[in-house]
Image (spheres, rainbow, N blue to C red):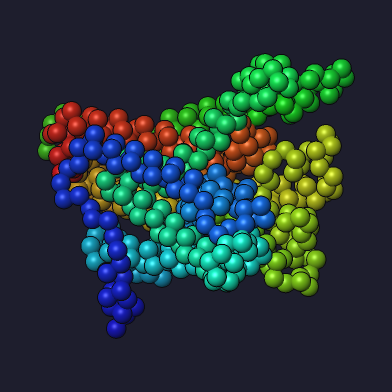
Amino acid sequence: MGWKDAAEPVLSRMPAVVRPEGHVPFRRKLGWTGGILVLYFFLTNVTLFGVDAAAANDLFGQFRSILAGQQGSVLQLGIGPIVTASIVLQLLGGADLLGLDTDNNPRDQVLYQGLQKLLVGVMIVLTGLPMVFAGGFLPADTAVATSLGIGTFGVKMLIFAQIAVGGVLILFMDEIVSKWGVGSGVGLFIIAGVSQQLVGGLFSWQGLGGASGFFPTWLGIITGSVQLPSSPTDLLSTIFLGQGQLLALITTVLIFGIVVYAESVRVEIPLSHARVKGARGRFPVKLIYASVLPMILVRALQANIQFLGRILDSQWAAMPAWLGEYASGQVTGGLFYYLAPIQSRSDWMWFLGLTSADPLDIAIRVLIDLVFMIVGGAIFAVFWVETTGMGPESTARQIQNSGMQIPGFRRNPQVIEKVMERYIPQVTVIGGALVGLLAVMANMLGTIGAVSGTGLLLTVSITYKLYEEIAEEQLMEMHPMMRQMFGGE
């Protein structure tokens, strides 16, 4: 008996959101998507009961924009457990250790979804327990422990229960959006979190002139809130790097432009219908073919590495210096320092006095971050394409089943697959590496609202794809025959 037979009774009974039996109207999809978005914002403002907020330490602060959670809230873990479980499944699937045919076998599809939920539950426990019981990241409020009479351990268990409920809720919220809404829940939550930071970075209210009241400030320069220094060097530093934040504005706009342009760069393979004369189409192979979503997996892997370092530092008093050195909760040396991603200008601009780190150490750290993101982006992009049915073989089968063929070639899946192999693998690697490079550069130059480069890339790309999906949904809503032609209900 194989592992599938042994695990099927458990995995097939995992709770799941029921898939709609027929076509879901576009307005209803928007309603479900909007409702889940409102619920997400609500949950990020529900604080954890029993936590001593003054002593709490945000373990994932630098990765918040991609983990889509909120420190001290019910959604403390964000999409972290979902992404980590996806990494494990990507690696197992890439090594062909699961033996699941999720494209054609309905039973294997159910087992895969059940296995994913099981792994998410395991990751909730493995991530949440250290946050609560180790390192003082979410310390228990002694006053609450005394008033409830359950002791500090009881309060910690209560905090962990709230975190676990939040992790399960965001899992099913993602599933609701994927089945009943537009796009994916993971992408929607990332857009919501990053948009909050961008708006907060662009428009803020700041008290000026003591009792003179509050004036809106935009990037700190429109209302003259910046005190301009007399030195030309200090003036440029203030405008571009300080309160002016013009470099962050330029970087943000540049990243927006590059991602939108890259999304429009594509190789279009002509198609024609085998039975309907004159019916033609094109299959686009975009430069960012695997999308930017594999970057979540790369950054989540880095976040888990830093998470491990913080836990070891809090629990291992004699941790070797070569492994990691920490000061005020921040890594300052050792292996974990070199593996920490560059998050802002203050991590590397030694020539402007923004950091006191040794230039050689900075160079090594930047090089490691570049290699990690570029190579990791390419690898995870390949895994993403192969496990989501976007590879040459799956694409050829989809084209064949739709009744289309490539003009000038025999109508055969193997022939179509060979044509697809000329483009998809190469474009996937190039696109994944390009996105990794852009993410590092955006982090190094800084962005509006201190959004991470990866978070900004994800937001632009996901928003672009969401726009395309909404346009497609509207088109099929207006023309039901097109929905039937493309396999809709």
| Rendering quarter of residue 4 | bottom left
133, above or below 482, in the image: below
| In the displayed structure image, the side of residue 228 where residue 408 appears, left or right | left
Name the one closer to the observer, 393 or 241.
241
Q: Can residue 467 be seen in this view?
A: yes
Q: Is residue 421 visible?
A: no
- The residue at 52%/35% (across/down) is 196
Residue 133, image x and y in percent? 60, 68
- The residue at 68%/34% (across/down) is 445
| Rendering quarter of residue 149 | bottom right
Question: Which image quadrant: the N terminus?
Answer: bottom left
388, above or below 238, in the image: below
- The residue at 31%/70% (across/down) is 11
Question: Which image quadrant: the C terminus?
Answer: top left
- The residue at 65%/29% (across/down) is 248
Residue 466, image x and y in percent? 37, 36
Residue 204, image x and y in percent? 60, 27
